[in-house]
Image (cartoon, coloured by chain):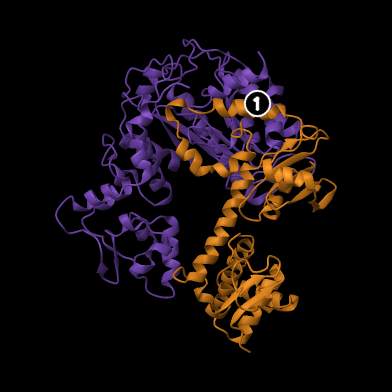
């Protein structure tokens, strides 16, 4: 069966892997297909043509994972999982093209002369870099009830990816990380091994998206923020000021949620 | 004196110790504990001088009985003095950690009464963190030169990394500028720590549950430009420290005349470009298989400032270049300017499925402006080797990167004061 053209999946990783399995089994050339998610309705591609909806199939998806892990490239599945969280509008297409390539010609899965390999590695790297960067740049403040709260505004959908780092660091504390741009967050409680979804009421959601700040009644000013600002200012060597280097390592788009840079 | 003022003084006093890493160790928090460590380390912020901040870097006290000429905290200098209490340091560490501002604590101190008295204060802080608060985050503890072996041992038991600063690259300079410290008082704790760390590693091979002693090893720091030693001597000293005492890192810090400094030998400006070349040479020693003798002819030679040490070495080679990208070994590829550790690995991986041609260079992540002179592609060559003398060097200088261009700008040095 010819699988050329645009495919639509349900927005889950299982669904995307199913698309890859279908293309693989049909023998279609990966360059001839594009993929979009039903969730965000096209994002600019395939609008002129109707898309073929592909239903999620756990068995097919699991087969893809097994075959991928059998290949030479042990990082391929991990990279696919990372790239899945990227914000590029055509990420689905590139992930499927890579999967089809990696399954048909395992030896070429690391060949950087191929555009699909370059795209996938780049997406995976950027998601992991943002995750790693946020592991450092996330700042918690203590709320009036003792819970720790952090607001983030990442490029990519990484809340789920930063969660494990903080569960490792602070298993005994209650804390939440909230993505103000996407309006969703995850919460950890010491007596619960699984993350809970954080929902905030609508006016608060809009306020967080606008300013990133919680109201004073819930989050009175934290004395350790002031102490941190003092430390931050004192630690720099005046004769070696380097604002360009600072910006390169810590881009200004993250400063809104950093006490040392937001005042 | 309130906590904020103490922190301002004691963080400012600690800023000239450039070691900042939170890497080299791994630990997960216990259920009722706080703090984990990841082997790669984490940068939490970048200060206004462009340096990564990953630890709460402070002195316990900046009072000091010594009078080392290069140090802002020396006895004879008129600066505001302060001391923390053990509880204050513990409180700051725990609360900054919970807010994800730090990976842990870097604790040093001026010498109060005696090296042992000072070590006892530092150990009291880290003992309370580890035992009372079950703190599992990163701890880098300074060892005071002259401290007794039992205290050095206990410090290493609680820390992820320890360091004792060699400060000056020769005994002669140490005698002139820091007469109260001796070479022995610095090297003896280093030897002792090396012995303890190696012994602990051996024991943990058969007893896996044994607690690790300073798992991220030890490091040290040298001041560059406060004394007359040349790069050749400095690099040979670093090489010996890496090989004989198994140090993890040597840090190089360009001397900045500080308020009240008594150093007489010092260039007008901090030698930032020289410091950069030393770090590049240090990387070549640790990751690229070079010897100090290949980078500097003898102890009196200096690294060239205008070009990086790897390119300088490559230009000095009569033969061996251009290297054939499709056949050279991994070790040979590492020696090509413009090819780093990642690039060499990618070349070896890509070679397995087909010949590498010039159009693949960008995807492989090579710095073509530099590498083009030193590589051939199945015989095809695109560089300038073999033409008249100096042509390749001129081309490399014209292609210089941003970091070196910035370090050369006089405007960076003329800014002073807060």
**Quarter the C terminus of chain A occupies:** top right
Chain B colour in the picture: purple
Residue A30: % across, % down: 55, 79
Describe the element under mark 1 as helix, strand or loop. helix
Residue B207: % across, % down: 68, 49
Chain A colour in the picture: orange
| Residue B383 in the figure: left or right of residue B42 | left
User: In this orientation, which residue lies closer to the viewer: A142 or B2?
Assistant: A142
Find disc 1 in the rendering and name its residue: A227
Relative to residue A119, is residue B281 depicted above or below? Answer: above
The single residue placed furthest to the bottom in the displayed view is A1
Q: Note whether residue A134 is visible.
A: yes
| Residue B322 in the figure: left or right of residue A102 | left
Q: Note whether residue A171 is visible.
A: no
| Residue B228 in the figure: left or right of residue A14 | left
Residue B211: % across, % down: 68, 42
Q: Residue at x 41, y 23 (%)?
A: B416
Q: Quadrant of residue B231?
A: top left
**Quarter the N terminus of chain A occupies:** bottom right
Q: Quadrant of residue A211?
A: top right
């Amino acid at each position: 069966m010819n699988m050329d053209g645009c495919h639509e999946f349900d927005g889950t990783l299982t669904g995307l892997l199913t698309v890859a399995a279908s293309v693989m089994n049909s023998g279609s050339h990966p360059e001839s297909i594009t993929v979009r998610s039903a969730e965000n309705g096209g994002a600019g591609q395939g609008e002129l043509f109707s898309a073929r909806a592909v239903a999620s199939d756990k068995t097919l998806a699991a087969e893809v994972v097994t075959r991928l892990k059998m290949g030479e490239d042990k990082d391929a599945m991990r990279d696919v999982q990372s790239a899945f969280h990227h914000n590029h509008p055509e990420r689905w297409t590139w992930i499927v093209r890579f999967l089809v390539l990696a399954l048909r010609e395992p030896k070429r899965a690391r060949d950087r002369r191929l555009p699909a390999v370059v795209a996938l590695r780049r997406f995976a790297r950027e998601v992991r870099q943002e995750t790693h960067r946020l592991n450092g740049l996330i700042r918690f403040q203590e709320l009036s009830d003792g819970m720790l709260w952090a607001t983030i505004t990442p490029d990519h959908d990484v809340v789920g990816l930063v969660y494990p780092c903080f569960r490792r660091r602070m298993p005994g504390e209650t804390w939440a990380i909230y993505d103000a741009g996407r309006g969703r967050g995850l919460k950890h409680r010491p007596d619960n091994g699984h993350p809970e979804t954080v929902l905030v009421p609508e006016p608060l959601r809009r306020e967080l998206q606008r300013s990133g700040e919680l109201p004073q009644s819930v989050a009175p000013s934290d004395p350790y923020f002031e102490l941190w600002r003092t430390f931050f200012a004192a630690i720099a060597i005046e004769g070696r000021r380097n604002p360009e280097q600072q910006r390169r390592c810590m881009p200004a788009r993250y400063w809104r949620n950093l006490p040392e840079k937001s005042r | 004196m309130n906590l904020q003022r103490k922190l301002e003084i004691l963080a400012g006093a600690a800023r000239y110790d450039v070691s900042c890493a939170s890497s080299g160790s791994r630990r997960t928090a216990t259920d009722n504990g706080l703090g984990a460590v990841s082997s790669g380390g984490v940068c939490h912020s970048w200060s206004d001088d462009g340096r990564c901040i990953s630890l709460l870097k402070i002195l316990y006290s900046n009072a000091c009985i010594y009078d080392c000429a290069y140090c802002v905290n020396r006895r004879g200098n008129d600066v505001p003095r302060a001391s923390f209490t053990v509880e204050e340091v513990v409180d700051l560490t725990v609360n900054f950690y919970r807010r994800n501002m730090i990976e842990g604590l870097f604790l040093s101190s001026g010498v109060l009464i005696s090296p042992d008295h000072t070590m006892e204060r530092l150990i009291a802080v880290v003992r309370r963190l580890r035992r009372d608060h079950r703190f599992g985050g990163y701890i880098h503890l300074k060892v005071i030169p002259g401290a007794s072996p039992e205290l050095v041992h206990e410090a290493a038991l609680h820390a992820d990394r320890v360091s004792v600063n060699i400060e000056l690259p020769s005994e002669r300079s140490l005698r002139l500028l820091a007469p109260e410290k001796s070479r022995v008082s610095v090297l003896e704790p280093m030897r002792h720590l090396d012995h303890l760390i190696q012994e602990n590693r051996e024991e943990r091979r058969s007893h896996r549950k044994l607690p690790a002693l300073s798992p991220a090893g030890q490091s040290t720091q040298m001041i560059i430009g406060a004394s007359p030693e040349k790069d050749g001597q400095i690099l040979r000293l670093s090489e010996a420290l890496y090989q004989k005492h198994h140090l993890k890192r040597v840090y190089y810090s360009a001397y900045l005349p500080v308020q009240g400094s008594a150093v007489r030998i010092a260039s007008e400006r901090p030698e930032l470009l020289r410091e950069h070349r030393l770090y590049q040479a240090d990387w070549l020693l640790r990751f690229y298989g070079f010897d100090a003798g290949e980078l500097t002819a003898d102890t009196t030679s200096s690294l060239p400032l205008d070009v990086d040490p790897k390119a300088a070495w490559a230009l000095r080679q009569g033969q061996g270049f251009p290297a054939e990208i499709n056949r050279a070994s991994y070790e040979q590829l590492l020696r090509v300017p413009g090819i780093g550790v990642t690039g060499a690995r990618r070349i070896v991986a890509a070679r397995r499925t087909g010949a590498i041609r010039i159009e693949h260079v960008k995807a492989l992540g090579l710095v073509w402006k530099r590498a083009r002179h030193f590589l051939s592609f199945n015989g095809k060559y695109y560089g300038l080797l073999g033409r008249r003398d100096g042509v390749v060097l001129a081309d490399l200088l014209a292609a210089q990167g941003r970091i070196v261009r910035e370090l050369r700008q006089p405007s960076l040095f003329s800014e002073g004061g807060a």
